[in-house]
Image (cartoon, helix red, strand yellow):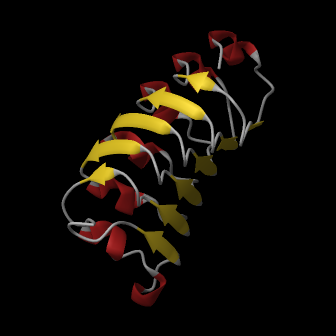
Amino acid sequence: LIDEIGLLKNLRFLILEQGTIEGEIPESIGNLLLLIVDLDFNRLIGPIPPSLYNIKSLLQLDLNDNQMTGLLSSDVKHWQKMTYLQLNNNAFTGIIPSELGQLQKLHTAFFHGNGFIGSMPQSVCDNLVAEGGKLSTLEADCAGQ
């Protein structure tokens, strides 16, 4: 992706899946009022840019099956409208932040196939449908697998 993507002020849906996009997601993406970012099955590397966490309009983020790295920031708390989060099959590391539990509209989340450590935060588990929340699909790796 090129940095000039941030100039497309009217862009709401960025869907470039199953392609040959390489490199990092540019920081300029945070200049947009995106609703959906779907960049799965590409060759993206690097972390989720800090500016992406500031897109409060984001409903869906699909970055699965790339080679993305880094930590999942506690700034996920800004994604209050997020309903679908797919980060599986990358190389993310660290813990899944407890702030993810603040996403009350999230109904689907995939984290498996990464290097996350530790347990799923209780704040996230409290949002499961079985607990009265909206989170109906949650996929993550079991310890040691």
Q: Is residue 115 above or below residue 68?
A: below
| Residue 109 visible in rendering | yes
What is the x, y in percent for residue 59? 64, 51
The quadrant where residue 92 appears = top left
**In the picture provided, is 67 more to the left or to the right than 36?**
left
| Frontmost residue, 18 versus 136 | 18
Q: In the current view of this chain or complex, which residue is farthest to the right? A: 10
Q: Quadrant of residue 1?
A: top right
Residue drawn at x 28%, y 44% as measured from the top left: 93
Quarter of the image that includes the C terminus: bottom left
Q: Compared with residue 51, is residue 118 higher up or lower down, i.e. above or below?
A: below
- Which percent across, then down, holds residue 143? 22, 69
Q: Position of residue 38 (x, y in %)?
A: 67, 43
**Which residue is at a point 54% across and 55% down the rendered structure image?**
85
The residue under the point 55% across, 49% down is: 64
The percent position of residue 50, horizontal first and vertical second, equals: 42, 27
At 24% from the left and 51% from the top, the residue drawn is: 95
Whether residue 135 appears in this view of the structure is no
What is the number of callouts on the image?
A: 0
Q: In which quarter of the view is residue 78 placed?
A: top left
Give left or right: position of 105 versus 74.
right
Of residues 128 and 92, which is closer to you in this image?
92
Q: Is residue 20 left or right of residue 11?
A: left
